[in-house]
Amino acid sequence: EAGVAQSPRYKIIEKRQSVAFWCNPISGHATLYWYQQILGQGPKLLIQFQNNGVVDDSQLPKDRFSAERLKGVDSTLKIQPAKLEDSAVYLCASSIRRSSDTEAFFGQGTRLTVV
Amino acid sequence: AQTVTQSQPEMSVQEAETVTLSCTYDTSESDYYLFWYKQPPSRQMILVIRQEAYKQQNATENRFSVNFQKAAKSFSLKISDSQLGDAAMYFCAYSSRGAQKLVFGQGTRLTINP
């Protein structure tokens, strides 16, 4: 089966600009996650969707980050305006359901550099 | 809040030998899952092994096994017969049973020497 697809792979922007990342989860996966991985650290969950509804966005900086999952399939994560500290890899993952007894499959991420 | 700590930023091992990566965690919950993920340079996180907290038997997956000490809140990963393809960043992670919200440690970079 096809894995989790993300684009772009790399993005360089200037601070205060906006940027958007796209994720296409594995077909049939109801749960979708966005993680932020700063260099030298483990990933941190930003937001979790169940179908097209948000179930956890407690660590999403809502003043500049937004995410949506239209029709419960693809998702986009947007940053507006970007700050230098937003430089990181943004990982998308999906799982069949929102339960720890199911495996979360990750995409290859988007590496964002803010200059 | 749950925390995961990996105290070894880097480890190295000779090819074909055995290496153990350490992980400790902190939680007040009694029912949870622990994971080891591998992240090669491609950046894609790959699940290596998973342990359910209520199972006393340590999980094994081919050359990978864990030593789960619930009382000590310790969860180490043993890689036997190390291969060059095992070289990667390894992350220990925690998740409550009900909601798959992974909390990751800082990672251990594993180098395999030929």
Image (spheres, helix red, strand yellow):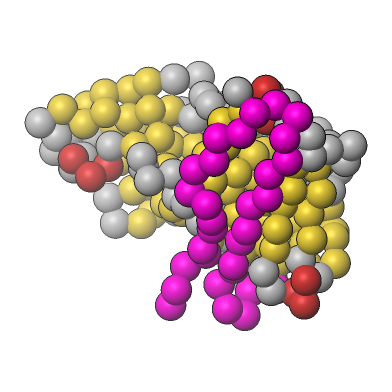
- Please identify the quadrant where the N terminus of chain B is shown: top right
Quarter of the image where one finds residue B99? bottom right
* Viewer-closest of B66 and A12: A12
- Please identify the quadrant where the C terminus of chain B is shown: top left
Which portion, as a residue range, is magenta? Answer: A1-30
Q: Residue at x 77, y 77 (%)?
A: A71
Q: Residue at x 74, y 48 (%)?
A: A78
**How far across and down, in percent of the image, does residue A74 sit?**
67, 69
Q: Is residue B87 magenta?
A: no
Quarter of the image where one finds residue A96? bottom right
**How far across and down, in percent of the image, does residue B34 sit?**
58, 46
**How far across and down, in percent of the image, does residue B20 sit?**
35, 31
Task: Name the side, left or right, on which B16 lies relative to A6.
Answer: left
Q: Residue furthest left?
A: B114
* Viewer-closest of B80 and A69: A69
* Viewer-closest of B15 and A16: A16
